Image: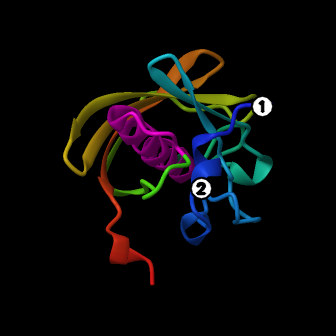
Amino acid sequence: MPQKAFQDYYPENVAHCYGCGRLNEHGYQIKTYWEGEESVTRFAPRPEHTAIPGFVYGGLLASLVDCHSTGTAAAAMYRAEGRAMDSLPAFRFVTASLHVDFLKPTPLQGELELRGRVKEIKGRKVIIETTLYAAGIATVRGETVCVQMPENFIP
């Protein structure tokens, strides 16, 4: 049986995000997994993700870092508490702060790989450092402060 992605565990009422929601048919529907102590997402940009010919739009790159990081934060919190990702209450995180550094232009061709590491878990806050690679070259680096979504956030 194939491994489920972090996003596959999101409850239906919070699975509509444009970047990571499995229920958003028009979104990216990214999938993130553990590889040891790092979280990994792979994404293939499409022609409509163009900034200038041959390169990916920076807003897309920032949103990939954002959604990769919030998924990683949820998975990290489950790990920290020794809980299965399908246990309740569900952990779901939103972004409090997103800092993105664009290191090099990111080519449109080929698969992008995001690798995240947990920098800190403190209470309801998780800080994730994510690096995005194109053909093995780091092109984007980000730090995301993720906070646990309050239960009353969703009506």
Residue 35 seen: yes
Numbered disc 2: secondary structure: loop
Residue at numbered disc 1: 2
Label 2 Cα neighbours within 10 Å, binned few <14 / some 14-19 / many ≥20: many
**Residue at the limit of the structure toward the left, as seen here:** 122
Which region of the structure is painted magenta? 59-85
CA distance for labels 2 and 1:
22 Å
Point out residue 137 in the picture as x, y percentages from the top left corner.
55, 17
As drawn, the label of residue 94 is none
Q: Nearer the viewer, residue 103 or 32?
A: 32
* Residue at x-position 47% and y-position 22%: 38
Quadrant location of residue 105? top right
Quarter holding the C terminus?
Answer: bottom left
The residue depicted at 42 percent of the width and 53 percent of the height is 91
Q: Is residue 76 left or right of residue 6?
A: left
Q: Is residue 76 magenta?
A: yes
Mark 1 neighbour density, 10 Å: few (under 14) some (14–19) many (20 or more): few
Q: Is residue 102 left or right of residue 47?
A: left
For disc 2, the marked residue is 19
